Image: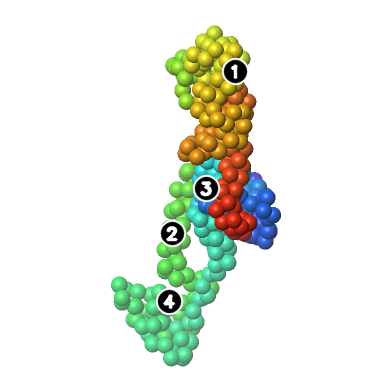
């Protein structure tokens, strides 16, 4: 891949910004919004996430021009925040069908890092000041001229003698050259950026070497299949990976152990009979017998018993032998809340909307 120049870096950022600007102008319908913090909000769409990913991938290299190093490290900070938000969202859900605990619009840290990138694209190098003689003609004294040039001999001590030599020098002997002048503070900032850049390059090269290294053959874990099956949330696929077996081999062994698989994972029979009825399974895992076979009523009853939506879905899936999704649970609970609010207010429900 060719060296990423500053112009190339700016182009990549602007291409991403076009997609994000379009998302900011987008006005979703009520069905397209996600529930977050008792509000219906506009989620960050897949196109926006893809644009962010393309941008961060473009900068994941050490072959970048010097004048784009600061931009690249700003993109690095954004990449980390984007990764953290995506992981958090994947872990708890995004609000499709049930309330989200992670903001579907992206985290505040992520957007702060994104705005920092945009700020750097518009930052301009400070123009060099006029020569000492011109500043003197404009009424400036030697102290202020020295401060403007960044000429110091100590804390709070502008180098006045240096300015006086500059004022008395012939044009060809003047020390100040506006074409090469850089303020000392800016020079220090450049040195800090380069130190950070060298550390950044070492990290990226290490990440790439780890990613490209041939994987060692894995050893089977020491726990038995039965011990793994009794671990909470374990599935046949996970057991197969841990024991270095095929899923079919695991299923055969589980059958010998009297352990069965349903849609949510592997479970011990817990003494239940193979021919036990659906009503008996419901009674064992969900005590709301008064609801009969009305799954929606059972969801509402378990919700009012303060059972978490995710656990409601797992319990009903377990005892029914068919999938009850978390999305369905979320919809039933939300409909129940709307009905309650309607009955309390005796007025049409208005859901707060935040674009």
Dot placed on the residue nearer the N-terminal end, 3 or 2:
3
Q: Which residue is denoted by mark 3 in the rendering?
A: 102
Q: Which residue is denoted by mark 2 in the rendering?
A: 191
- Give x and y (percent) for residue 63: 57, 49
At mark 4, the secondary structure is helix
Disc 4 from disc 1: Cα separation: 88 Å
- Mark 1 and mark 4 in contact (Cβ < 8 Å)? no
Residue at 58% x, 22% y: name it: 279
Residue 30 vs residue 200, the one in the foreground: 30
Q: Report the mark closest to the observer, 4 or 3.
A: 3
Q: Report the mark closest to the observer, 1 or 3.
A: 1
Residue 2 to residue 245: above or below: below
Residue 213 to residue 95: above or below: above
Disc 1 from disc 3: Cα separation: 40 Å
Crowd band around label 4 with a 10 angstrom C-alpha radius: few (<14), some (14–19), many (20+): many
Dot placed on the residue nearer the N-terminal end, 4 or 2:
4
Crowd band around label 1 with a 10 angstrom C-alpha radius: few (<14), some (14–19), many (20+): few
Dot placed on the residue nearer the N-terminal end, 1 or 3:
3
């Amino acid at each position: 891949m060719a060296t990423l120049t500053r112009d190339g870096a700016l182009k990549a950022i602007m291409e991403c910004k076009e997609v994000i600007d379009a998302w900011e102008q987008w006005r979703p319908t009520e069905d397209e919004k996600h529930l977050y913090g008792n509000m219906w909000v506009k989620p960050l769409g897949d196109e926006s996430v893809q644009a962010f990913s393309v941008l961060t991938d473009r900068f994941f290299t050490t072959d970048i021009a010097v004048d784009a190093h600061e931009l690249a490290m700003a993109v690095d900070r954004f990449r980390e925040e984007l990764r953290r938000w995506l992981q958090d969202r994947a872990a708890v859900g995004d609000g499709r069908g049930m309330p989200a605990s992670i903001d579907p619009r992206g985290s505040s840290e992520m957007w702060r890092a994104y705005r920092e990138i945009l700020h750097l694209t518009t930052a301009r190098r400070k123009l060099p000041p006029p020569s000492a003689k011109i500043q003197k003609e404009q009424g400036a004294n030697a102290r202020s001229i020295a401060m403007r040039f960044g000429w110091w001999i100590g804390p709070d001590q502008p180098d006045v003698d240096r300015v006086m030599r500059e004022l008395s020098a012939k044009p060809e002997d003047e020390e100040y050259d506006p074409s090469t002048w850089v303020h000392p503070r800016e020079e220090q900032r450049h040195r800090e950026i380069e130190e950070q850049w060298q550390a950044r390059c070492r990290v990226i090269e290490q990440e790439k070497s780890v990613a490209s290294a041939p994987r060692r053959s894995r050893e089977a874990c020491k726990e038995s299949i039965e011990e793994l099956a009794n671990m909470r949330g374990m599935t046949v696929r996970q057991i197969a990976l841990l024991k270095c077996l095929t899923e079919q081999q695991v299923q055969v062994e589980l059958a010998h152990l009297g352990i069965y698989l349903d849609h949510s994972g592997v479970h011990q029979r817990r003494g239940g009979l193979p021919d036990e009825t659906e009503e008996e399974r419901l009674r064992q895992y969900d005590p709301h017998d008064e609801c009969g076979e009305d799954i929606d009523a059972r969801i509402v009853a378990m919700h009012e018993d303060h059972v978490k939506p995710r656990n409601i879905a797992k319990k009903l899936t377990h005892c029914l032998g068919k999938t009850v999704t978390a999305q369905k649970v979320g919809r039933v609970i939300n409909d129940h809340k709307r009905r309650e609010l309607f009955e309390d207010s005796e007025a049409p429900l208005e859901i707060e909307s935040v674009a």
